[in-house]
Amino acid sequence: MVATLQILAVTILSILGALFTASLGWLESGEAFVPRKFAASILRAVIAGFVSALGFSTIQIIGPWEYIVAFLTGAGIDVIGNRASGALKAKT
């Protein structure tokens, strides 16, 4: 079974992955920082952490590759969430 600290590390890496992509998106936009827009990314980062914690709690061993996958999972969830919210805003 996986140790609790390993699950915590996976959760933190997922959150960092999501916040990393959110920060890159803000830097790429060239706009002034708006905390309200960044709040949605923080929410998606927390969701990514929960998803990773649940997913990785079922495996037997967490190695270096799993930590990389956790980071990329967080990044992917933020990117998909950002694209989905942009598509929904465009429809309304």
Image (cartoon, grey):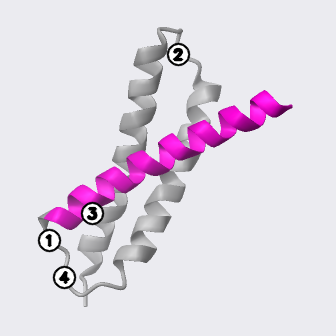
List the single residue furthest toward the bottom.
1
Which residue is denoted by mark 2 in the rendering?
Answer: 33
Picture coordinates of residue 12, whole percent (x, y): 34, 56
Whether residue 27 can be seen here:
yes
Give me the C-alpha separation between circle 1 and circle 2. Answer: 36 Å
Give me the C-alpha separation between circle 1 and circle 3. Answer: 11 Å
At horizontal 58% and vertical 38% (from top left) the residue drawn is: 82
Secondary structure found at label 1: loop
Give me the C-alpha separation between circle 2 and circle 4. Answer: 40 Å
Which residue is denoted by mark 1 in the rendering?
Answer: 63
Q: Earlier in the sequence, mark 2 or mark 4?
A: 2
List the single residue furthest toward the right.
92
Q: Count residues near mark 4 (Cα–Cα under 10 Å), then give few for <14, some for 14-19, many for 20+.
A: few
At horizontal 13% and vertical 64% (from top left) the residue drawn is: 64
Of marks 2 and 4, the one in the foreground: 4
Please give the label number shown on residue 61. Answer: 4
The residue nearer to you, when weighing 10 against 89, is: 89
44 lies above or below 58: above
**What is the magenta range?**
65-92
Give me the C-alpha separation between circle 3 and circle 2. Answer: 28 Å
